[in-house]
Amino acid sequence: MFSGSVVPVSWYLVLSAILFSIGVAAFLIKRNIITVFMSIELMLNAVNLAFIVFAHRWHQVSGQIFVLFVMVVAAAEAAVGLAIIIAVFRARNTLNVDQVDLMKL
Amino acid sequence: MYLVLFLIFGGLCVAGALNLLFQRHPINSALSLIVVMSSLAVLYLLLGAEFLAAAQVIVYSGAIMVLFTFVIMLLNAGREERTHGSKAAYAVGIPGAAALLGALVYIFLSNGKLLGPTLLGASWVVPTAFSATLFRDLLLPFEVTSVLLLVAILGAVALARKEH
């Protein structure tokens, strides 16, 4: 069954799980606010892969359309998030998340 | 051939993600994230999502990551230093992520027979079928995302503006 022209769905899901777990680990470990933000994008990409493999397996278009909406929201999130990062850097002069723990200066 | 392509680009994805995790300089992390996103576009193409593969390259590895590298260069971000918080994060983050990975991999592999195989070219979603669903059945959510993008643009401009 597993010849060279067939890949099991579970392998794609395992790849998605690996990427998501690396994203979670990077989100918790990284201290630079931009890298933390990038690990969120990595987790979104991992979820997108799972959506697309399920859309392929059950011949549904809706899984792919959900991925399109995730991309739109990720683009909006990146624009606003990076603007917030620029504002934080202006106020604190640092990008370390440990030094950005007060609501007010 | 399909299996080989999956292994090459899946391996590139994992290698890029691990490089994101281990690099100390944010620009290196950003460039390895571009590798992950471009390899994911190839996997989307293998799964028959041709429109999304193009959108992945244009939106993610194009627009979003260019924005990230631009901000990294604008803020002149240097190497991150280890702090007290990072030691606690190592103690919690690595075992937590490993436990999550173990649970997910166990569930997926134990249900592997049930999930079945993927075949190359078995279900190509042509852009006409994709757009028929998007613009007919899901017209309202599609229009709402345009408002979301407008709000995001206004918010980004308002937040990043210099105050006088």
Image (cartoon, coloured by chain):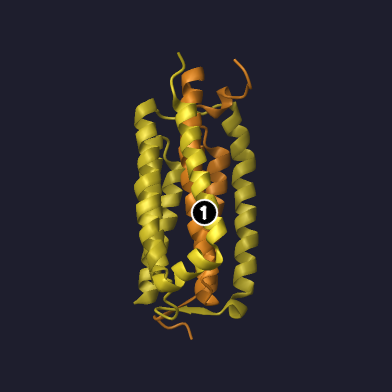
Is residue B95 shown above or below A93?
below
Is residue B56 shown above or below A105?
below
Residue B129 placed where, x, y %? 45, 73
Q: Is residue B99 left or right of residue B57?
A: right
Quadrant occupied by the C terminus of chain A: top right
Q: Which chain is yellow?
A: B
Residue in the image at 57% along x and 26% along y: A98
Q: In this view of the protein, which residue sits in the foreground, B112 or A104?
A: A104
Residue B65 placed where, x, y %? 38, 44
Asked if residue B152 can be seen in this view, the reply is yes
| Chain at tag 1 | B
Residue in the image at 63% along x and 74% along y: B111
Residue A37 placed where, x, y %? 50, 39
Is residue A93 shown above or below A6?
above
Residue extending furthest top? B164
Q: In this view of the protein, which residue sits in the foreground, B73 or B56?
A: B56
Q: Is residue A85 left or right of residue B28?
A: right
Q: Secondary structure at mark 1?
A: helix
Three-letter residue code for mark 1: Glu
Q: In this view of the protein, which residue sits in the foreground, B154 or B15?
A: B154
Q: Which chain is orange?
A: A
What is the number of callouts on the image?
Answer: 1
Which residue does the numbered mark 1 point to in the structure image?
A: B143
* Quarter assignment of residue B49: bottom left
Residue in the image at 39% along x and 65% along y: B51
Residue B30 placed where, x, y %? 39, 42
Residue in the image at 52% along x and 77% along y: A59
